[in-house]
Image: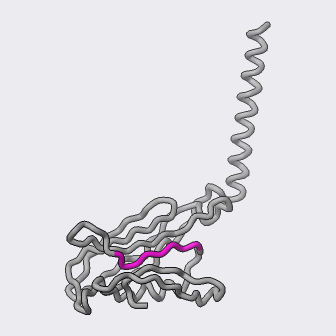
Amino acid sequence: MFLSRLKIFVLVIVSITVVFFTTSQACADMFGFFKKHDFVLSVPINGQLLEDGKPLANVTVFKSFTFGDEYLDETTSDENGHFSFPEKVIKTSKPSNMFDNGSLIQHIYIKSDNAQDKVIWFARLGLHKQSATLNGYLNNLMCDIAKEPQTYDIPIIEDKQHVFTVYTTCKI
């Protein structure tokens, strides 16, 4: 008798579990929680690296963008200090997930002789749509690493009630 009740109990628990997980998966798919979309993590970035106004050649520039996961790229400045990164597109379900309110962290930096990172650009963005304001800055960075980084509140042209807060050595 006890063994029979145990089998029935286990069968009921397994049935409830199967129904719950298949139904929640169907709801999640229906509302797009797991559906992955192309997301532009970064527009093309172009800049010039300077030290006391003089171009810095052959310096490795790192770009670390964090949007749930971290995406790291590197490039080397040319003889005139120019550097660039191509557009970075990822597949993610984050923008369509109403329960995820994560931010995008942009960090562009170089490593100095004492292994410390020298910040070129750092921003934490709460807005996930592309911004012409931000894209304009990232497409024309002029960064002098001899200067101390400053914090700027950049008015967003597309959304006059908000600003981008950026910590940078670049000319704003």
Foreground residue among 157 and 42: 157
Residue found at the very far bottom of the displayed protein: 53
Point 22% across, 68% down: residue? 114
> Looking at the picture, how far across and down is residue 148, in whole percent?
34, 83
In the depicted structure, whether residue 87 falls above or below residue 91: below
> Looking at the picture, how far across and down is residue 104, in whole percent?
52, 69
User: Split into 4 quadrants, where in the image is the C terminus?
Assistant: bottom left
> Looking at the picture, how far across and down is residue 128, in whole percent?
58, 73
Number of numbered discs: 0
Foreground residue among 149 and 36: 149
Left or right: residue 73 compared with residue 8: left
In the depicted structure, whether residue 142 falls above or below residue 61: below
Foreground residue among 44 and 140: 140
| SS assignment for the magenta stretch, majority | strand
Left or right: residue 25 compared with residue 89: right
Left or right: residue 68 compared with residue 100: left
Quadrant of res 115: bottom left
Colouring used for the render: one colour
Residue found at the very far top of the displayed protein: 1
User: Split into 4 quadrants, where in the image is the N terminus?
Assistant: top right
Point 44% across, 68% down: residue? 65
> Looking at the picture, how far across and down is residue 66, in whole percent?
47, 65
Point 62% across, 64% down: residue? 101
Let me know if residue 123 is in the magenta part. Answer: yes
Let me know if residue 120 is in the magenta part. Answer: yes
Magenta range: 119-126
Residue 49 visible in image: no
Quadrant of res 86: bottom left
Foreground residue among 30 and 65: 65
Residue 141 visible in image: yes
